[in-house]
């Protein structure tokens, strides 16, 4: 006769089945917990990624290819030699009428360090490092490496607008 009695065979069979089910259940729970952990890390990391990733720069001229000039009325720049700093689409702008009577506009961001350039009658001046531009926007003194960005300026229904010189704003 063998050592295994029917009761021992039943116990071995029960242990074998129980051990197999326990291992597969344990494996399933470990995989499920790992998957939930990865999902949680992803859910926590995604907002951080969105915050740190570079955002596309909005087109300051919008769909119409023009932007309203803030803080400057056409009357304030009506006579030759008059000018004023204002803004458009969260950027700075200088609008003035040159001695010949032409209305001119330049982005007021200095090409050297990004400071605000101001109108001073016969020149455009950056107070940060003494950068000086002529009324055509060309750098004539100080550290600015290149001229100011010229903008097209025009009046419609008593409101001043600026747009890029090269035509409609490019989508990028």
Image (cartoon, rainbow, N blue to C red):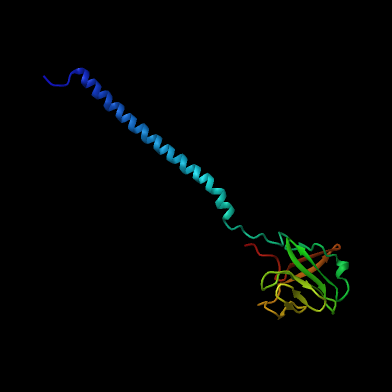
Q: Is residue 26 left or right of residue 158?
A: left
Q: Is residue 23 left or right of residue 144?
A: left
Q: Is residue 48 above or below residue 107?
A: above
The quadrant of the picture occupied by the C terminus is bottom right
Number of labels in the image equals 0
What residue occupies the far bottom of the structure in this picture?
Answer: 140
Residue at 61% in and 57% down: 55
The quadrant of the picture occupied by the N terminus is top left
Q: Position of residue 37 (x, y in %)?
A: 46, 41
Q: Nearer the viewer, residue 17 or 115?
A: 115
Residue at 66% in and 65% down: 170
Q: Is residue 94 above or below residue 143?
A: above
Residue at 69% in and 65% down: 169
Residue 171 visible to an observer of this rendering:
yes
Residue 105 visible to an observer of this rendering:
no
- Using the rendered view, name the quadrant where residue 144 is placed: bottom right
Q: Is residue 46 above or below residue 78?
A: above
Q: Position of residue 38 (x, y in %)?
A: 46, 43
Q: Position of residue 66 (x, y in %)?
A: 75, 63
- Using the rendered view, name the quadrant where residue 6 is placed: top left
- Using the rendered view, name the quadrant where residue 143 is placed: bottom right
């Amino acid at each position: 006769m063998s050592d295994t009695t029917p009761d021992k065979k039943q116990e071995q069979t029960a242990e074998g089945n129980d051990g197999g089910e326990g291992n597969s259940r344990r494996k399933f729970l470990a995989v499920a917990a790992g998957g939930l952990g990865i999902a949680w890390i992803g859910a926590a990391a995604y907002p951080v990624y969105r915050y740190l990733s570079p955002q596309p720069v909005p087109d300051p001229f919008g769909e119409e290819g023009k932007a309203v000039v803030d803080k400057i009325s056409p009357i304030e720049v009506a006579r030759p030699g008059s000018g004023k700093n204002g803004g458009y689409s969260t950027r700075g702008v200088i609008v003035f009428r040159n001695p010949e009577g032409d209305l001119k506009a330049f982005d007021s961001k200095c090409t050297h360090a990004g400071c605000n350039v101001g109108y001073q009658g016969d020149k455009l001046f950056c107070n940060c490092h003494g950068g000086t531009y002529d009324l055509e926007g060309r750098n004539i003194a100080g550290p600015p490496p290149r001229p100011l960005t010229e903008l097209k300026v025009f009046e419609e229904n008593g409101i001043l607008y600026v747009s890029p010189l090269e035509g409609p704003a490019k989508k990028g």
